[in-house]
Image (cartoon, rainbow, N blue to C red):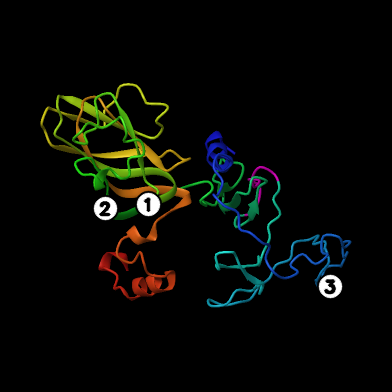
Protein backbone atom coordinates (compact mmCIF):
# COMPACT_ATOMS: atom_id res chain seq x y z
CA UNK A 1 0.00 0.00 0.00
CA UNK A 2 1.41 3.43 -0.93
CA UNK A 3 1.71 6.34 1.50
CA UNK A 4 -1.07 8.12 -0.41
CA UNK A 5 -3.36 5.15 0.07
CA UNK A 6 -2.46 4.99 3.76
CA UNK A 7 -3.33 8.66 4.11
CA UNK A 8 -6.66 8.32 2.29
CA UNK A 9 -7.71 5.20 4.14
CA UNK A 10 -6.61 6.37 7.59
CA UNK A 11 -8.61 9.61 7.39
CA UNK A 12 -11.49 7.61 8.88
CA UNK A 13 -9.62 7.96 12.20
CA UNK A 14 -9.85 11.77 12.00
CA UNK A 15 -13.60 12.05 11.64
CA UNK A 16 -16.16 9.38 12.37
CA UNK A 17 -19.88 9.57 11.69
CA UNK A 18 -21.67 11.97 13.98
CA UNK A 19 -23.89 9.31 15.49
CA UNK A 20 -24.03 5.58 15.90
CA UNK A 21 -27.12 3.62 14.95
CA UNK A 22 -28.74 2.55 18.17
CA UNK A 23 -30.02 -0.95 18.83
CA UNK A 24 -28.74 -4.10 17.18
CA UNK A 25 -30.58 -5.58 14.26
CA UNK A 26 -33.29 -8.11 15.02
CA UNK A 27 -32.83 -11.78 14.31
CA UNK A 28 -30.27 -14.36 15.29
CA UNK A 29 -27.71 -13.62 12.58
CA UNK A 30 -24.85 -14.94 14.71
CA UNK A 31 -26.49 -18.02 16.16
CA UNK A 32 -23.62 -19.90 17.74
CA UNK A 33 -21.65 -20.15 14.51
CA UNK A 34 -18.45 -18.78 16.01
CA UNK A 35 -18.60 -21.20 18.94
CA UNK A 36 -19.16 -24.31 16.83
CA UNK A 37 -16.24 -26.47 15.72
CA UNK A 38 -15.16 -26.83 12.08
CA UNK A 39 -17.40 -29.12 10.04
CA UNK A 40 -14.46 -30.85 8.33
CA UNK A 41 -16.67 -31.75 5.37
CA UNK A 42 -14.92 -33.34 2.43
CA UNK A 43 -15.14 -31.71 -1.03
CA UNK A 44 -18.54 -32.48 -2.47
CA UNK A 45 -20.28 -32.64 0.91
CA UNK A 46 -23.03 -30.12 1.61
CA UNK A 47 -22.39 -26.93 3.56
CA UNK A 48 -23.59 -27.37 7.14
CA UNK A 49 -25.72 -24.46 8.31
CA UNK A 50 -24.82 -22.92 11.66
CA UNK A 51 -21.31 -24.41 11.60
CA UNK A 52 -17.86 -23.25 10.56
CA UNK A 53 -17.13 -25.05 7.28
CA UNK A 54 -13.49 -25.49 6.32
CA UNK A 55 -13.39 -24.69 2.59
CA UNK A 56 -10.04 -26.21 1.70
CA UNK A 57 -9.98 -26.10 -2.10
CA UNK A 58 -11.93 -23.08 -3.40
CA UNK A 59 -15.42 -23.86 -4.67
CA UNK A 60 -16.74 -22.37 -7.91
CA UNK A 61 -20.44 -21.74 -8.46
CA UNK A 62 -21.53 -21.66 -12.09
CA UNK A 63 -24.86 -20.93 -13.65
CA UNK A 64 -27.18 -17.99 -13.44
CA UNK A 65 -28.13 -15.76 -16.34
CA UNK A 66 -28.06 -12.14 -17.37
CA UNK A 67 -30.87 -11.53 -14.88
CA UNK A 68 -30.00 -14.00 -12.13
CA UNK A 69 -26.83 -14.48 -10.04
CA UNK A 70 -25.50 -17.98 -9.33
CA UNK A 71 -25.57 -17.24 -5.60
CA UNK A 72 -28.11 -15.20 -3.65
CA UNK A 73 -27.73 -14.20 -0.02
CA UNK A 74 -30.67 -12.77 1.88
CA UNK A 75 -31.17 -11.60 5.45
CA UNK A 76 -34.83 -10.88 6.15
CA UNK A 77 -34.22 -9.22 9.54
CA UNK A 78 -35.26 -5.56 9.52
CA UNK A 79 -35.47 -3.15 12.45
CA UNK A 80 -36.18 0.57 12.64
CA UNK A 81 -33.81 2.92 14.44
CA UNK A 82 -35.10 5.55 16.92
CA UNK A 83 -35.90 7.86 13.99
CA UNK A 84 -38.04 5.20 12.32
CA UNK A 85 -35.55 4.51 9.51
CA UNK A 86 -35.51 0.78 8.66
CA UNK A 87 -32.17 -1.04 8.65
CA UNK A 88 -31.63 -4.57 7.40
CA UNK A 89 -29.39 -7.31 8.70
CA UNK A 90 -26.20 -8.10 6.76
CA UNK A 91 -26.48 -10.50 3.82
CA UNK A 92 -22.70 -11.04 3.66
CA UNK A 93 -19.80 -10.52 6.05
CA UNK A 94 -16.15 -10.04 5.09
CA UNK A 95 -13.88 -10.71 8.07
CA UNK A 96 -11.39 -7.80 8.39
CA UNK A 97 -7.77 -8.99 8.06
CA UNK A 98 -4.42 -7.41 7.26
CA UNK A 99 -3.70 -3.90 5.99
CA UNK A 100 -4.93 -4.55 2.46
CA UNK A 101 -5.46 -7.21 -0.19
CA UNK A 102 -2.37 -9.05 -1.47
CA UNK A 103 -1.30 -8.26 -5.03
CA UNK A 104 -1.01 -11.99 -5.76
CA UNK A 105 -4.78 -12.40 -5.36
CA UNK A 106 -6.84 -13.32 -8.42
CA UNK A 107 -8.59 -10.64 -10.45
CA UNK A 108 -12.05 -10.12 -8.98
CA UNK A 109 -10.96 -10.89 -5.41
CA UNK A 110 -12.50 -8.75 -2.67
CA UNK A 111 -11.44 -8.30 0.96
CA UNK A 112 -11.73 -5.92 3.92
CA UNK A 113 -8.75 -4.71 5.94
CA UNK A 114 -8.55 -4.15 9.68
CA UNK A 115 -9.41 -0.44 9.33
CA UNK A 116 -12.66 -1.26 7.51
CA UNK A 117 -11.63 -0.43 3.95
CA UNK A 118 -12.84 -2.77 1.19
CA UNK A 119 -10.22 -3.76 -1.41
CA UNK A 120 -10.58 -5.37 -4.83
CA UNK A 121 -8.21 -6.78 -7.44
CA UNK A 122 -9.42 -4.97 -10.55
CA UNK A 123 -7.12 -6.09 -13.36
CA UNK A 124 -4.02 -8.19 -14.04
CA UNK A 125 -0.62 -6.61 -13.81
CA UNK A 126 1.46 -6.04 -16.93
CA UNK A 127 5.07 -7.17 -17.30
CA UNK A 128 7.43 -6.43 -15.65
CA UNK A 129 4.91 -5.88 -12.86
CA UNK A 130 4.97 -8.90 -10.53
CA UNK A 131 1.38 -8.77 -9.29
CA UNK A 132 -2.14 -7.60 -10.08
CA UNK A 133 -3.68 -4.17 -9.61
CA UNK A 134 -5.19 -3.80 -6.13
CA UNK A 135 -7.44 -0.81 -5.41
CA UNK A 136 -9.64 0.18 -2.51
CA UNK A 137 -13.37 0.63 -3.00
CA UNK A 138 -14.25 4.27 -2.50
CA UNK A 139 -16.65 4.96 0.35
CA UNK A 140 -17.50 8.04 2.36
CA UNK A 141 -14.79 7.00 4.82
CA UNK A 142 -11.88 7.18 2.37
CA UNK A 143 -13.09 9.62 -0.29
CA UNK A 144 -15.52 12.48 -0.76
CA UNK A 145 -17.99 13.84 -3.30
CA UNK A 146 -18.88 17.21 -4.74
CA UNK A 147 -22.55 18.07 -4.23
CA UNK A 148 -23.88 21.04 -6.26
CA UNK A 149 -26.79 22.90 -4.67
CA UNK A 150 -29.24 25.58 -5.69
CA UNK A 151 -27.23 28.78 -5.01
CA UNK A 152 -27.81 30.01 -1.47
CA UNK A 153 -27.21 33.47 -0.03
CA UNK A 154 -25.43 32.81 3.26
CA UNK A 155 -24.66 36.32 4.49
CA UNK A 156 -25.18 39.89 3.32
CA UNK A 157 -23.85 42.36 5.87
CA UNK A 158 -25.96 45.18 4.42
CA UNK A 159 -29.10 43.93 6.21
CA UNK A 160 -29.88 42.61 9.69
CA UNK A 161 -31.41 39.43 8.24
CA UNK A 162 -28.33 38.94 6.09
CA UNK A 163 -26.12 39.00 9.18
CA UNK A 164 -28.06 36.25 11.01
CA UNK A 165 -25.53 33.49 10.25
CA UNK A 166 -22.55 35.46 11.57
CA UNK A 167 -21.63 33.72 14.81
CA UNK A 168 -19.53 36.51 16.33
CA UNK A 169 -21.03 39.72 14.93
CA UNK A 170 -20.64 41.66 18.20
CA UNK A 171 -17.57 43.89 18.06
CA UNK A 172 -16.62 42.88 14.53
CA UNK A 173 -19.09 44.99 12.51
CA UNK A 174 -19.53 48.75 12.30
CA UNK A 175 -22.86 50.56 12.74
CA UNK A 176 -23.72 49.95 9.07
CA UNK A 177 -22.97 46.24 9.36
CA UNK A 178 -19.63 46.31 7.51
CA UNK A 179 -16.90 43.89 8.54
CA UNK A 180 -14.32 46.01 10.34
CA UNK A 181 -10.71 46.40 9.29
CA UNK A 182 -8.50 43.69 10.78
CA UNK A 183 -11.45 41.68 12.16
CA UNK A 184 -12.57 38.11 11.46
CA UNK A 185 -16.09 36.70 11.50
CA UNK A 186 -17.21 33.09 11.60
CA UNK A 187 -20.07 32.17 9.26
CA UNK A 188 -22.37 29.28 10.21
CA UNK A 189 -23.19 26.83 7.39
CA UNK A 190 -25.19 24.21 9.29
CA UNK A 191 -28.44 25.27 7.59
CA UNK A 192 -26.92 23.72 4.47
CA UNK A 193 -24.39 21.03 5.40
CA UNK A 194 -23.53 18.61 8.21
CA UNK A 195 -19.89 17.53 8.61
CA UNK A 196 -18.89 19.43 5.49
CA UNK A 197 -15.29 19.33 4.26
CA UNK A 198 -15.22 22.19 1.75
CA UNK A 199 -17.48 24.74 0.12
CA UNK A 200 -17.57 26.41 -3.31
CA UNK A 201 -19.07 29.85 -3.50
CA UNK A 202 -18.99 33.46 -4.62
CA UNK A 203 -17.88 36.41 -2.49
CA UNK A 204 -18.82 40.01 -3.18
CA UNK A 205 -17.40 43.11 -1.50
CA UNK A 206 -19.11 46.48 -1.72
CA UNK A 207 -18.94 49.81 0.08
CA UNK A 208 -15.31 49.36 1.13
CA UNK A 209 -13.85 52.36 2.96
CA UNK A 210 -10.35 51.81 1.54
CA UNK A 211 -8.43 49.59 -0.86
CA UNK A 212 -7.68 46.18 0.60
CA UNK A 213 -8.37 42.46 0.43
CA UNK A 214 -10.55 39.77 1.97
CA UNK A 215 -9.54 36.28 3.13
CA UNK A 216 -11.84 33.23 3.41
CA UNK A 217 -10.47 30.13 5.16
CA UNK A 218 -11.56 27.32 7.54
CA UNK A 219 -10.12 27.78 11.03
CA UNK A 220 -10.49 31.10 12.91
CA UNK A 221 -7.60 30.14 15.19
CA UNK A 222 -5.13 29.65 12.36
CA UNK A 223 -5.43 32.49 9.85
CA UNK A 224 -3.06 31.76 6.97
CA UNK A 225 -0.27 34.20 6.07
CA UNK A 226 -0.79 36.90 3.50
CA UNK A 227 -3.07 35.75 0.71
CA UNK A 228 -6.24 37.18 -0.78
CA UNK A 229 -9.54 35.67 -1.83
CA UNK A 230 -10.48 39.00 -3.40
CA UNK A 231 -8.79 42.41 -3.78
CA UNK A 232 -10.81 45.63 -3.95
CA UNK A 233 -10.63 49.42 -4.17
CA UNK A 234 -12.46 51.94 -2.02
CA UNK A 235 -16.18 52.07 -2.88
CA UNK A 236 -15.83 49.29 -5.44
CA UNK A 237 -18.35 46.46 -5.88
CA UNK A 238 -16.47 43.35 -6.96
CA UNK A 239 -17.06 39.58 -6.91
CA UNK A 240 -14.84 36.50 -7.04
CA UNK A 241 -15.32 32.74 -6.91
CA UNK A 242 -13.84 30.92 -3.91
CA UNK A 243 -13.16 27.43 -2.57
CA UNK A 244 -12.27 26.82 1.04
CA UNK A 245 -12.23 24.06 3.60
CA UNK A 246 -14.84 24.02 6.36
CA UNK A 247 -14.08 23.88 10.07
CA UNK A 248 -14.97 20.19 10.62
CA UNK A 249 -16.06 20.63 14.24
CA UNK A 250 -18.72 23.29 13.74
CA UNK A 251 -19.47 23.64 9.98
CA UNK A 252 -18.21 27.20 9.87
CA UNK A 253 -15.88 29.24 7.68
CA UNK A 254 -13.92 32.37 8.58
CA UNK A 255 -13.86 35.72 6.76
CA UNK A 256 -11.12 38.27 7.51
CA UNK A 257 -11.16 41.85 6.18
CA UNK A 258 -7.93 43.78 5.68
CA UNK A 259 -10.07 46.92 5.22
CA UNK A 260 -13.62 47.71 6.37
CA UNK A 261 -16.19 46.53 3.81
CA UNK A 262 -19.60 44.95 3.32
CA UNK A 263 -19.42 41.24 2.53
CA UNK A 264 -21.86 39.03 0.61
CA UNK A 265 -21.39 35.25 0.46
CA UNK A 266 -23.25 32.81 -1.80
CA UNK A 267 -22.59 29.06 -1.89
CA UNK A 268 -23.09 26.76 -4.90
CA UNK A 269 -21.62 23.37 -3.86
CA UNK A 270 -20.28 21.40 -0.91
CA UNK A 271 -17.70 18.65 -0.55
CA UNK A 272 -18.75 15.89 1.88
CA UNK A 273 -17.69 12.38 2.81
CA UNK A 274 -19.23 11.15 6.07
CA UNK A 275 -21.45 14.24 6.13
CA UNK A 276 -24.51 15.25 4.15
CA UNK A 277 -26.11 18.22 2.41
CA UNK A 278 -29.56 19.52 3.29
CA UNK A 279 -31.81 17.83 0.68
CA UNK A 280 -34.05 20.90 0.42
CA UNK A 281 -31.31 22.81 -1.42
CA UNK A 282 -30.40 20.11 -3.96
CA UNK A 283 -31.18 20.93 -7.61
CA UNK A 284 -34.72 20.29 -8.93
CA UNK A 285 -35.31 16.71 -7.76
CA UNK A 286 -33.74 17.20 -4.35
CA UNK A 287 -37.03 16.75 -2.50
CA UNK A 288 -37.98 13.56 -4.34
CA UNK A 289 -37.49 10.21 -2.71
CA UNK A 290 -34.75 8.10 -4.27
CA UNK A 291 -37.23 5.86 -6.14
CA UNK A 292 -38.94 8.85 -7.80
CA UNK A 293 -35.59 10.35 -8.73
CA UNK A 294 -34.43 7.13 -10.39
CA UNK A 295 -37.76 6.76 -12.22
CA UNK A 296 -37.53 10.27 -13.66
CA UNK A 297 -33.94 9.78 -14.73
CA UNK A 298 -34.83 6.46 -16.39
CA UNK A 299 -37.49 8.19 -18.50
CA UNK A 300 -35.09 10.73 -19.89
CA UNK A 301 -33.97 10.23 -23.48
CA UNK A 302 -30.21 9.98 -23.84
CA UNK A 303 -28.50 12.34 -26.26
CA UNK A 304 -26.94 10.63 -29.27
CA UNK A 305 -23.39 10.84 -27.90
CA UNK A 306 -24.39 9.02 -24.68
CA UNK A 307 -26.00 5.99 -26.36
Q: Foreground residue, 187 or 75?
A: 187
Residue at the spot x=72%, y=70% of the render?
A: 27
In the picture, which quadrant includes the C terminus?
A: bottom left
Quadrant hosting residue 131: top right
Which circle, 1 or 2, is nearer the viewer?
1
Of the two numbered discs 1 and 2 on the same chain, state the one appearing first in sequence. Answer: 2
Bin the neighbour count of mark 3 within 10 Å (Cα to Cα): few under 14, some 14-19, many 20 and up.
few
Task: Of the two numbered discs 1 and 3 on the same chain, state the one appearing first in sequence.
Answer: 3
Magenta span main SS: loop
Q: Is residue 105 magenta?
A: yes
Q: Which residue is mark 1?
A: 191
Residue at 89% of width from left, 61% of height from top? Answer: 37
Distance of label 1 from label 2 (alpha carbons): 13 Å
Q: In this rendering, would 92 be left or right of 176?
A: right
How far across and how far down the image is residue 136, in percent?
56, 48
Marks 3 and 2 sit apart, C-alpha to C-alpha, by 62 Å
**Disc 3 or 2, which lies upstream in sequence?**
3
Find disc 3 in the rendering and name its residue.
45
Q: Would residue 145 be seen by someone viewing this image from the given angle?
A: no
> Which labelled disc corresponds to residue 108?
none
Amino acid sequence: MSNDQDHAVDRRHLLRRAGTVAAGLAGAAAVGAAAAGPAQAAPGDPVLQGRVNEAGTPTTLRGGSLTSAPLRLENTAVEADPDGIPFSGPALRLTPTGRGLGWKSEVGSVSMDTSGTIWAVTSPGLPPMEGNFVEYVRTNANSNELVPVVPQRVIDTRTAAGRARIVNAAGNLDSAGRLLRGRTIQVNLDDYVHLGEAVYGNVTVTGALAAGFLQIYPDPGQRPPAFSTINFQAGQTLSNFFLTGINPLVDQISVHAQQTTHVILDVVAFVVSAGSVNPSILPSTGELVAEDRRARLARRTKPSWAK
